[in-house]
Amino acid sequence: MHTHGHIHKGMFRKVKVAKWVSEELGIDEYFARILPHQKVDIVRDLQKRAYMGRSLE
């Protein structure tokens, strides 16, 4: 969840909890009510974005 000292992502079951925790902790992006197969797609997308971000540095 940490990227360069910033909390970046979070996954939660309930939308209200996700929103509250994200606001309290300064999380930039969060996901809620995600099905197992959707988690795989999200993680792959996050990995791709992280890889692309490193290549730009």
Image: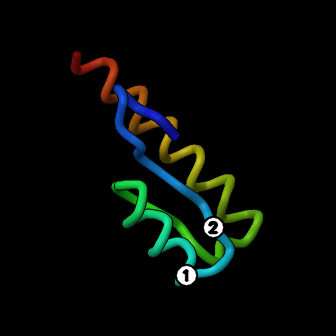
Separation of disc 1 and disc 2 at Cα? 7 Å
* Residue toward you, 11 or 57: 11
State the residue at coordinates (35%, 37%).
Answer: 6
Position of residue 23 measured from the top left corner of the image (x, y, whole percent): 37, 66
State the residue at coordinates (51%, 36%).
Answer: 47
Question: Toward which corner of the image does residue 26 lie, by quadrant?
Answer: bottom left
Position of residue 20 measured from the top left corner of the image (x, y, whole percent): 46, 74
Decide: is 56 above or below 5: above
Task: Give the position of the C terminus as an image quadrant.
Answer: top left
Tell me the colour scheme of the image.
rainbow
Position of residue 15 measured from the top left corner of the image (x, y, whole percent): 55, 81
Decide: is 10 above or below 33: above
**Dot 2: element:** strand
* Residue toward you, 17 or 35: 17
Residue of label 1? 15
* Residue toward you, 5 or 43: 5
Decide: is 49 above or below 17: above
Residue of label 2? 12
Question: Toward which corner of the image does residue 53 lie, by quadrant?
Answer: top left
**Callout 1 crowding tier (Cα within 10 Å): few <14, some 14–19, many ≥20:** some
Amino acid on which the number 2 mark rests in the picture: Phe
Mark linked to residue 47 = none
Question: Toward which corner of the image does residue 3 lie, by quadrant?
Answer: top left
Amino acid on which the number 1 mark rests in the picture: Val
Residues tagged 1 and 2 counted as in contact (Cβ below 8 A): yes
